[in-house]
Image (cartoon, rainbow, N blue to C red):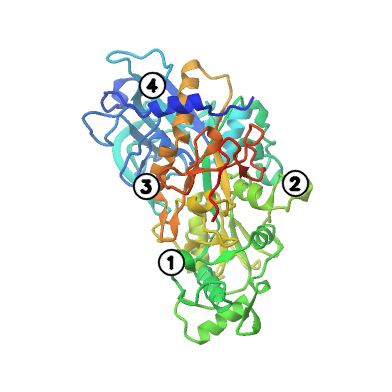
Amino acid sequence: MFTTLSRNLIALGLALAATGSAWALTPADGAPQLSLYIPGSQSNDPAFGFMINNTTPANALCLNDPNPTGTGTTTHVYFHTKGANSAATNDEYSAIYCYTDSTKIPGLTGGVAPNNKTRLWISRRRLGASFVGLDAAANGTKLTYLKDPTTAVCTAFNGSYSSGGASYQWNYSCTTATSGISATAATSDVTPDAFRGVDNVTPGKTDIDASTLDNRFALGGHIIGTPVTLKLRNALQYAQVQNGTLPASCTVGNETPACVPSLSKEILVSIFSGQLYDWSTLKVKAAGAEKTLPEVVADGVTAGVAGLSNPLDTAVHVCRRENGAGQQVALLSNILKSPCLGDSSPKLAEPGGFADIQYATSLGAVDRCLGDYNNGTNGWFGTSNPAPFPNPPATGVPHGNQWAIGIQTTERNASNSASYRFIKIDGALPTGEQVFLGHYPLVGEYALSWKNNVTANQDAALNALAIYSGLPSTIAARNSDLSNHSWGQAGYIALSANGHMPPATWDPANPVTPYTRALNGTPDACAIPVVNPDFGSVELR
């Protein structure tokens, strides 16, 4: 049976912000009394208490420290560093260790003196992303994690890892990951019902049967973007100024909302299904003449327009994710309508076709893949990989200044430090406001899912985590931390389907969408959002 967040649970969730008194917890204080092993996407990481940009976000389960040391809470963050602190990444194994009690986890039992505290270990695994996590939770597939602070061989070390314009900090470096551990729950960028069909399932694995997961909480809406290489953004921007789509005042490189270029949903479907594989397919009517996109850019280069350059080739280059990656499943279910339409859904393009398709198997890999296409660097391709198009020798073939597109979460690159930019879809920016208005279509409802075979304390902790994670105040706080772009605030949006009342007009402090995919009582990633009848009003704009 599908689990939803009732209004009573929401009221309970408001009380979960209360904190108790404790102190910073270290491995020397003893083994964990409550352990959660949660594989899957990063979509809900801030609610666990991971440190981002030298700030420990308010979190669902860990008690605050009245005498702040280190993180300022009882939480310490653990990263798998493989014996070399420089080897740590945010894409692999990590954990937090903290004190908790029944003020954070209603119904928790078995705390110890003083103050009935419980030592809580939350071990996260992001390798394999959403599908691998759901497969572990639904099918019992055992995986590798940081088992506990002792077995993981962890020593105190304050380190930092940067990715996508954000910095992730840790307090303990761990050398040893342990295999053969069962998942307690899974996080995913999209609700589990969408992880079926060949494009949405990791090769060699079977579909996820969402009905086997007794508890499936859609926590919030995760706004996904379609980033393009910086030089492609400039090309689209210039072409759309020439044809009058963008204001004439939009000089190339302008980062303001009015000057962000757009692609239609139909063009995106054509690109990601491999039907549109050459940028020359896009025609531009400017000054009464019809030209291709590369021809219009070539005219601008000849005219000396700053920020424009002719591409190395006109092929469509795509930095896509691996099958089963949550952001890609969001693109498939929202834009390509897969697996929603069955055999009528366009199939996701694979390497080896006319378009140049690259598998970028993490958020950081998407950054590097787009950067290499734009700049001619080797962060993704390396110095010995085959050049991407068209099937050249294995070494020595140049890349760079090629126009590429990808799939990425919109809390990344708010600083514009990476060599890509997000674009509009059908004229709508990937912002919470545009999602609230029903204009921007690419939103995955990120989820926490588990079976009823967990212990009573684990179940209580997961329910508390789900409730806290879905609060509009929780989502508003994480948006303000990471998702402020020059064109607006992106990131996440709270769900009215979870009992939260949407504001009459957009309010970033109360970012609740008036639309729902759960009209029949269960969230459905393939459903077209409709006005939530429980509240029955939307802003017209």
Spatial CA distance of label 2 from label 1 is 37 Å
Q: Residues within 10 Å of mark 4 (few under 14, many from 20)?
A: many
Picture quadrant where residue 207 is located: top right
Residue 28 falls left or right of residue 372:
left
Q: Residue furthest bottom?
A: 303
- Closer to viewer: mark 3 or mark 4: 3
Above or below: residue 388 compared with residue 466: below
Of callouts 2 and 1, which one flags the residue occurring earlier in the amino acid sequence?
Answer: 1
Spatial CA distance of label 2 from label 4 is 46 Å
Is residue 326 visible in the rendered image? The answer is: yes
Q: Residues within 10 Å of mark 2 (few under 14, many from 20)?
A: few
Query: Where does label 3 land, which residue?
Result: 481
Query: Where does label 2 land, which residue?
Result: 341
**Pointer 1 with pointer 3, Cβ within 8 A:** no
> For the residue marked with disc 4, what is the amino acid?
Pro
Of callouts 1 and 4, which one flags the residue occurring earlier in the amino acid sequence?
Answer: 4
Of callouts 2 and 4, which one flags the residue occurring earlier in the amino acid sequence?
Answer: 4
Of callouts 1 and 3, which one flags the residue occurring earlier in the amino acid sequence?
Answer: 1
Residue found at x 55% / y 49% = 361
Query: Where does label 1 land, which residue?
Result: 255
The answer to which of 392 and 128 lies nearer the viewer is 128
The answer to which of 494 and 61 lies nearer the viewer is 494
- Closer to viewer: mark 2 or mark 4: 2
Above or below: residue 26 compared with residue 453: below
Spatial CA distance of label 1 from label 4 is 48 Å
> For the residue marked with disc 3, what is the amino acid?
Asp
